[in-house]
Amino acid sequence: MEKEEDVKVGANKFSERQPLGTAAQSDNKDYKEPPPAPFFEPGELKSWSFYRAGIAEFIATFLFLYITILTVMGVNRSPNKCSSVGIQGIAWSFGGMIFALVYCTAGISGGHINPAVTFGLFLARKLSLTRALFYIVMQCLGAICGAGVVKGFEGNARYELFKGGANFVNPGYTKGDGLGAEIVGTFVLVYTVFSATDAKRNARDSHVPILAPLPIGFAVFLVHLATIPITGTGINPARSLGAALIFNRDLAWDGHWIFWVGPFIGAALAAVYHQIVIRAIPFKTRA
């Protein structure tokens, strides 16, 4: 007699006869799907851990903008790309900071550092609406402060000359191109976040939680390599808002919506893909 399936309507109906890779290490018989986070949890507002997590998101996004925008300023100040770290260096600064900051804050706030990541995890019921909104506000405030400190170091003239590290669609590309680049780039990032932090993988492979920041940071690095020539790479509405608000010129605000709509669409698509296609959550019965 066939074993009872944990998935209805054909999802995983025919399991692999010989699992490949890490899937061969364990059949996860003891794994149970964690319950979804409540939509609204009033008790969080009375908990210090809730505010501590928000502060961690603020500080992490502040440091993220400080290091990355300062790197962009340094590259733009150089007489030629060969005398600086260049585009590859900019991409490494974004990816490397995400790697470091996710490692530092994952145990406190989850290490989102990005409203799009927060939005995607909210759609997957990984956190409440209360916490999601609080995180997004703190991330935006941190980004504004980080960009502001960079402007203080660089001075108004230099900061405006180098466009403040703001995101905008570069000449030769349309706004549609920019929107598409932001959607796909954010999809790559948020899909990587879901895969790297998957609770089922954590239960199966003990090394996954330790290594999770590495693929997330590497995804940010690769997306920046691909899309810096198109939009300067946003994939993070807080990063785009902070740079635009401190630069505060028409160039930064014209099409700024792209750096909110694109990442949120990309995050939503990644959440749907991972939860429905990869994990088949809606088809699983609950014990």
Image (spheres, grey):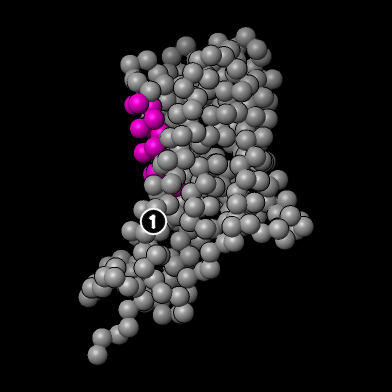
Does the stretch in magenta take in 211?
no
Vertical order, 52 against 43 (above or below) = above
Q: What amino acid is found at the position of numbered circle 1 in the picture? A: His
The quadrant of the picture occupied by the N terminus is bottom left
> Left or right: where does residue 31 sit relative to residue 56?
left
Q: Image quarter for residue 5?
A: bottom left
Residue 180 sits inside the magenta stretch: yes
- Residue 38 shown left or right of residue 201 in the figure: right
Nearer the observer, 152 or 38: 38
Residue at screen point 39% across, 47% down = 269
What residue is shown at x 49% (from left), y 33% (from top)? 260
Q: Is residue 257 visible?
A: yes
Q: Residue at x 52, y 69 (%)?
A: 34
Q: Residue 4, image x and y in percent?
A: 32, 83
The quarter holding residue 148 reads top right
Q: Nearer the viewer, residue 112 or 22?
A: 112
Q: How many numbered dots are placed on residues in this image?
A: 1
- Magenta: main secondary structure equals helix
Above or below, 116 against 286 in this view is above
The magenta stretch is 176-190
Residue shown at 26%/70% (left/top)?
A: 10
The residue carrying mark 1 is 274
> Residue 8 location, x and y as percent?
32, 73
Quarter of the figure with residue 15: bottom left
Image height of 32 relative to 122, above or below: below
Residue placed farthest to the bottom in the image?
A: 1
Residue 135 drawn at (x, y percent): 63, 45
Label 1: how many Cα within 10 Å (few below 14, some 14–19, many 20+): many
| Residue 43 horizontal/vertical position (percent) | 72, 61
Q: Is residue 214 visible?
A: no
